Amino acid sequence: MLNIILYNVAILASVAVVFAIILYLTAKKFHVEPNLLADEIASILPQANCGACGSAGCQDFANRCCNSSPEEFTQLYCPVGGADVMAKIAEKLGYTASDHEPTVAVLHCNGTCQNAPDKVQYIGLKSCRLASRVFVGKTGCPDGCLRLGDCVRNCPFGAIEMNPETGLPVVNKAKCTSCGSCVRICPRGLYEIRPIGPNGIQVYVACNNKQKGAIARKNCKAACIGCMKCTKICSEVKVEDNLSHIPTTVSAQEYGASLAETCPTGAIIFTGNKDE
């Protein structure tokens, strides 16, 4: 009996030794030396881990910065940290940080409670993503804001709040870091990260409804009706699928006021300090 016990112990010990050797050799083969410079860069980053830079997180972005050439580094940018953070990282690496135009999230919908009154009552979970799978929306607009606040709950910086009067989410430009969380969470694709022009001036179409004019207006007074009037103001503006689109290359300073004034439904929004 004792011999059997000793025999089993010897077998288990041998197996343990074999596995220990395998683990040791594997650890030696795949050992990665710590990158102290990457850790220093990671400490400069805001640690939001939002993915807006196109990396898996701040540590991954720090590794990309360390492994980049001076030319490649100019293409890297942390929207949350902004120019100040990128300048500090560039100093660590001995590179030069490129200029990036400030951006902010905008909502392509103006279907307020006044412009698009509710036609039906929604009883269910307060989630835009879930609601979008089961019904067209309280206003009847198949492309408009569902007003259930997924973007508000998912903004990591508290930059979006629901306006109780309009029923729509409002982006606080001072808090927005252009991380893109709202872009990714909105099931209707209503958010866009757009450049902030001189004096904070922006011009964009606050509508995503692709229905024909009469039907679109029936659901929302501020819907784009594809009337083409904006295209006569600026040739860069295009109307496709009954919906106007103003590219970011269009100068809000030059065309913003005219575009907003010529829109018969008020679907074009012109914001910022327009008098400077």
Image (cartoon, rainbow, N blue to C red):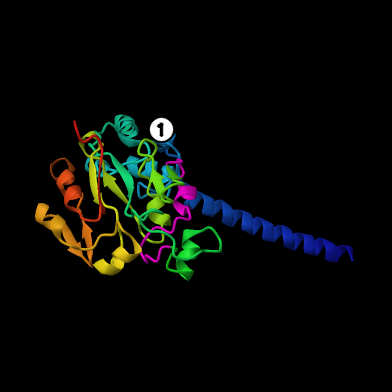
Q: Amino acid at mark 1?
A: Ile
Specify the segment rendered in magenta.
Answer: 139-159
Query: What percent of the width, then of the height, locates residue 81?
Result: 37, 36
Picture layout, residue 49 above or below residue 273: below
State yes or no: residue 142 in magenta.
Answer: yes
Picture layout, residue 236 above or below residue 7: above
The quarter of the picture where residue 238 lies is bottom left
Which residue has dot 1 on it? 44
On the rendered image, what quadrant is the N terminus found in?
Answer: bottom right
Picture layout, residue 121 above or below residue 86: below
State yes or no: residue 31 in magenta.
Answer: no
Q: Is residue 12 left or right of residue 262?
A: right
The majority secondary structure of the magenta stretch comes to loop
Q: Give the number of callouts.
A: 1
Task: Name the secondary structure under disc 1.
Answer: helix
Q: Is residue 84 left or right of residue 126?
A: left
- Which sits in the foreground, 273 or 74? 273
